[in-house]
């Protein structure tokens, strides 16, 4: 039976990188004899334009009945004044899918240190997995918005912290065995709850994993000063958003960074971590590697096709190692020629 993928290109460079990822998925499907079926859906600004809602009911239904959801990127200045912005549609989708754990890996492969803005000795050996809580915190608290006063509530329950912490500890067991939990426990009540819930789970079930607690401001510094010291970084929604954009640059460009958002079951949402990049949209300049690696994560986590996922990741690494790449990493490719190079290697 074919695996169903809800395919949401979105806005700006979203369709450019999503179509690149689809080309690579199709090449991998052919090679590994997988049957993939796509349901094309309106989402984000494109859905506001076509249907008046960034997350229309049809799209929601397609996502909920799919095995996995692939998203390009959404948003842009065109919809800044919209009553319901494209970004609000994305939050609604994450909540509707129950994808509370957002995995954002960032690494510098041996020999690829020259792409990093850091000195070679600092970039060497970077291999991070950021586990970002995705359906709680400031993003989902009550908001009030007036002319001269506005509020955003930050709320976490212990269960919300424990379930995402479990994902981080399990991931650490399969990697370097270390979790750095990031919070602002010297100021915020939600961070003190975060820290105590993480400690409690660690004590009860994961004593074999090394756990440290780092304040978020210090982590922002350490990510630049000594990024190779870290293995899994566990943090709440907003801190994870900010730290993952920062961390992505260690590898050379935000355009290289993939993500998987997972919940209780195998169904997941896969998207590069970057946005719609309005400054380069429509010019064929977007780096599709993050989207392509997100497609690999889709095959691994939602479809259980790890051989095909390994193949895609190896092809991207090989293409980059041979000097192929888009302008953001100093290469001469455009989106299409880099994608073709990856397809060729599959
Ligand atoms: P952005 O990530 O779109 O762009 C930041 C910078 O990175 C820009 O200079 C851009 O050119 C560059 N960049 C991003 N992706 C790239 C790629 N694939 N290749 C090469 N360079 C790339 O962030 P922004 O400009 O702050 O936001 C633009 C819009 O995207 C906003 O509406 C924002 O809300 C939205 N956004 C959406 C998502 C998403 O869909 N998941 C994520 C982040 C931002
Ligand atoms: C991301 C984006 C989103 C977020 C926005 C577009 C809502 O920045 O996926 O990182 O903040 O989660
Ligand atoms: Mn972000």
Image (tube, rainbow, N blue to C red):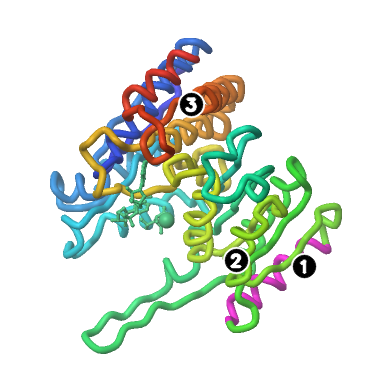
Q: Residue at x 15, y 52 (%)?
A: 52
The residue wearing badge 1 is 200
Residues drawn in magenta: 188-203
Task: Please tell me which of labels 2 and 1 falls first in the chain.
Answer: 1
In front here: 291 or 326? 326
The residue wearing badge 2 is 221
Which residue lies most toward the right here? 208
Residue 346 among magenta residues? no
Q: Is residue 128 above or below residue 112?
A: below
Q: CA distance from mark 3 to mark 2?
A: 30 Å
The residue wearing badge 3 is 323
Q: Main secondary structure of the magenta part?
A: helix
The quarter holding residue 38 reads top left
Which mark lies nearer to you, 2 or 1? 2
Q: Circle 2: is it few (<14), some (14-19), or many (20+) Cα within 10 Å?
A: few
Q: Quadrant of ligand 2?
A: bottom left
Which mark lies nearer to you, 3 or 2? 3
């Amino acid at each position: 039976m074919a695996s169903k993928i809800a395919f949401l290109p979105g806005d700006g460079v979203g369709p450019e990188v999503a179509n690149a990822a689809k080309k690579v998925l199709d090449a991998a499907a052919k090679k590994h004899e997988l049957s993939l079926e796509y349901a094309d859906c309106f989402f984000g600004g494109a859905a506001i334009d076509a249907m008046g809602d960034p997350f229309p009911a049809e799209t929601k239904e397609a996502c909920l009945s799919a095995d996995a959801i692939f998203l390009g990127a959404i948003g842009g200045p065109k919809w800044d004044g919209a009553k319901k912005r494209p970004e609000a549609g994305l939050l609604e989708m994450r909540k509707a899918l129950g994808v509370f754990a957002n995995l954002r890996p960032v690494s510098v492969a041996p020999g690829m240190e020259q792409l990093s803005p850091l000195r070679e000795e600092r970039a060497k050996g970077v291999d991070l997995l950021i586990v970002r809580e995705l359906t709680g915190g400031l993003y989902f608290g009550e908001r009030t918005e007036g002319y001269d006063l506005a509020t955003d509530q930050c709320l976490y329950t212990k269960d919300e912290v424990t379930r995402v912490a479990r994902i981080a500890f399990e991931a650490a067991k399969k990697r370097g065995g270390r979790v750095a939990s990031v919070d602002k426990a010297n100021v915020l009540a939600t961070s003190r709850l975060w820290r105590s819930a993480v400690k409690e789970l660690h004590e009860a079930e994961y004593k074999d994993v090394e756990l440290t607690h780092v304040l978020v401001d210090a982590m922002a510094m350490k990510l630049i000063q000594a990024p190779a010291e870290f293995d899994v970084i566990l943090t709440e929604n907003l801190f994870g958003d900010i730290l993952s954009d920062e961390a992505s640059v260690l590898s050379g460009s935000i355009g290289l960074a993939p993500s998987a958002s997972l919940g209780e079951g195998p169904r997941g949402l896969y998207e590069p971590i970057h946005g719609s990049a309005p400054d380069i949209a429509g010019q064929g300049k977007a780096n599709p590697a993050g989207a392509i690696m997100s497609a690999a994560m889709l095959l691994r986590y939602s479809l259980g096709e790890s051989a095909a996922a390994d193949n895609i990741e190896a092809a991207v690494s090989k293409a980059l190692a041979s000097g192929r790449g888009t302008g953001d990493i100093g290469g001469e490719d455009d989106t299409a020629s880099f994608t073709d190079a990856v397809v060729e290697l599959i």
